[in-house]
Amino acid sequence: MNQPIRILGIAGSLRRKSYNRAALRAAQQLAPEDAVIDSFELDGIPVFSEDDERQPPPKVVEFKKRIREADAILFVTPEYNYSIPGVLKNAIDWASRPYGDSAWTDKPAAIMGASVGTLGTARAQYHLRQVFVFLNVHAINQPEVMIANAAQNFDAEGNLTNETTKNLIRQLLTNLVARTRDLQQAKSAKPANA
């Protein structure tokens, strides 16, 4: 039996009752049997400065360690002003630095997000995919999980209630696990001197 795929879930919101934190909790419950989703809280990561990149603060050191230990990443992002929240972009920048020491390289990653608006974080997700290009992250393209009108899709306790969305999350995670296993297999088959 294969080892479970370890997925690191990152919610791009600091708000305790955020719909995106709730969506990440839903994903943890909906993960395939051969996967486990852990999470990392972004609070406490200072604003990135290149002056500090070679001696990063402990929270950043821990973040990069957790990314490297994970087999795959699940980003759950809100949309702020048509784009990625500053706290998420800041964390991504820290983990990619210094140049040549990016924790993101070759990681498979999936994106989902929730919004009270009608587009369900579409613009933020597309901007995040653009960032993936430079990070050399393997994006899972389908299905797109964009939870629109979030207030109608979560109950008062923050539980996801929409069955269609739950099925999309299940499929996204299944695809992430499959892609991760494919990439692992390809790496193990590659000759050491290649």
Image (cartoon, helix red, strand yellow):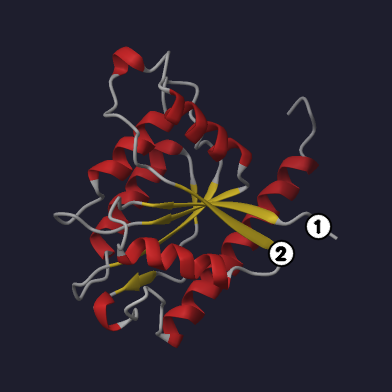
Which residue is farthest right? 1
Residue 165 visible here? yes
Q: Nearer the viewer, residue 176 or 51?
A: 51
Mark 1 falls on what kind of element?
A: loop
Q: Which mark is residue 34?
A: 2
Residue at point 42%, 14% (across, down):
55
Q: Which mark is residue 18?
A: none
> Looking at the image, do the residues carrying marks 2 and 1 touch, with CB atoms under 8 Å apart?
yes
- Residue 189's quadrant in the figure? top right
Horizontally, is 131 left or right of 151 in the view? right
Question: Which kind of residue does numbered mark 2 sit on?
Answer: Asp
Disc 1: which residue: 2
Question: Which kind of residue does numbered mark 1 sit on?
Answer: Asn
Horizontally, is 65 left or right of 129 in the view? right
Q: Nearer the viewer, residue 83 or 33?
A: 33
Locate residue 63, reporting x and y percent: 48, 35
Residue at point 81%, 57% (across, down):
2
Answer few, some or many: residues within 10 Å of disc 2's Cα (few below 14, many 20 plus, some between 14 and 19). few
For the N terminus, which image quadrant?
A: bottom right
